[in-house]
Image (cartoon, rainbow, N blue to C red):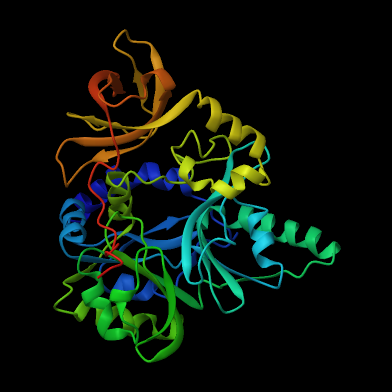
Amino acid sequence: MLSTLSRVARQWVRPLAVRQAATEAADGPRKTCLYDFHVKRGGRMVDFAGFLLPVQYTEGMSASHRHVREHCGLFDVSHMLQTEVRGKDRLAFVESLCVADLHGLPDNGATLSVLTTHSGGVVDDLVITKTPLGYIHMVSNAARRKEVSKLLADAREKWAAKGKDVVIKHYVPEDWALLALQGPKAAAALQPLVDIDLAQLRFMTSSLAAVDGHERCRVTRCGYTGEDGFEVCIPASISVPVSEQLLACKSGRVQLAGLGVRDSLRIEAGLCLYGAELSEEISPIEAGLTWLVAKRRREAADFPGASSILQQIRQGPARRRVGLRSQGAPARAGAVILDLKGTQVGHVTSGCPSPSLGGNVAMGFVQAAFAKATTRLQLLVRNKAVDAEVTKMPFVKTNYYTPDKKK
């Protein structure tokens, strides 16, 4: 069984691990506060972005993937970089680094955004929450921890030299857990443990809440799977009992899920991964994320890389991110994309067999002329051309919690 699990884990996650491996400490990868919890429950631990995290558990990848889609999965994402930005100039400071309209964001609202380079590329993608408590809460990628920390520190130093009030605090992963509870039964599983009405918490909104009686935990309705779900920031001291209670919730049918399933779910949902669909060489417009660039920010043109990004919005980029469907052997990151004449027109950035749909799904970049849905292409897989078709994304319909405001 172990050899089978290892083989499957390599098939699903090796390309992901290669893209994001970024060990920080010279003496080896770090452990989240839930490391022993994962090992005790059979988690197969791998070094991912400098942290030991479970790639999978005893259930097969496909079965675990489908369980999240149908019921609920619990992911440990404590390795992510969590940051608080305080001070009276915090909104303008964060806006100076990203494309979001934070002044227009309501209190307790969250938004996906990107930190951009001066050439129009992406330093990292992140979720930014505007709290009414005097700070901004940000969650960014562990693999970009050094780059984001340096960007914030350097910018803060420049702002301080101008007399601006900005204070930055990074959470310590060993002291704080970040749990991602994902799936249609996530609310049913979490509701007994919190003192807020989750029905009032819409997709991309956030609130402080008591979790298992511990005050001042942050609950945000968001995720990386395309399903309803929450990211819950809690102290390390309660991370194990909270996780155990979630797993024991019969109405939620919660199962532990690993990095492999997180990757296949986000690919089906058509969501970008830094190091694959996003990088300092890829603009948000090329990645199909034009909607992230807020109207007010476009008009002001006051974010890093504005000239290049706004030009791409006006004229269209030379290449575009697309979704691809195929049969047979799945295309993985790096696979060449060909037109029907055999000429290279792009490359695959992410791909996997789709447990939800059957067949294979992939994302990649192609020349703009080949980006239209239903365009027939070929993928070079193991030196053989495989027929593929450009497909609209998400591949699987998203199920974010957006109830009618009138109800």
Whether residue 168 sits left or right of residue 330 in the image: it is: right
Name of the residue lying farthest toward the bottom:
213
Q: 271 or 289: nearer the eye?
A: 289
- Image quarter hosting the N terminus: bottom left
In the rendered image, the vertical position of residue 14 relative to residue 77, given as above or below: above
Name of the residue lying farthest toward the front:
406
Q: 261 or 407: nearer the eye?
A: 407
Residue 152 quadrant: bottom right
- Image quarter hosting the C terminus: bottom left
Whether residue 298 sits left or right of residue 5 in the image: it is: right
Residue 82 location (% of width, % of height): 53, 67
Which residue sits at x=36%, y=27%?
A: 335
Whether residue 5 sits left or right of residue 218 in the image: it is: left
Count the labels in the image.
0
Residue 169 location (% of width, % of height): 64, 72
Q: 110 or 122: nearer the eye?
A: 110
| Residue 79 in view | no
| Residue 358 in view | yes
Residue 53 quadrant: bottom left
Which residue sits at x=54%, y=55%?
A: 23
Residue 14 location (% of width, % of height): 36, 44
Which residue sits at x=43%, y=22%?
A: 368
Residue 123 location (% of width, % of height): 59, 47
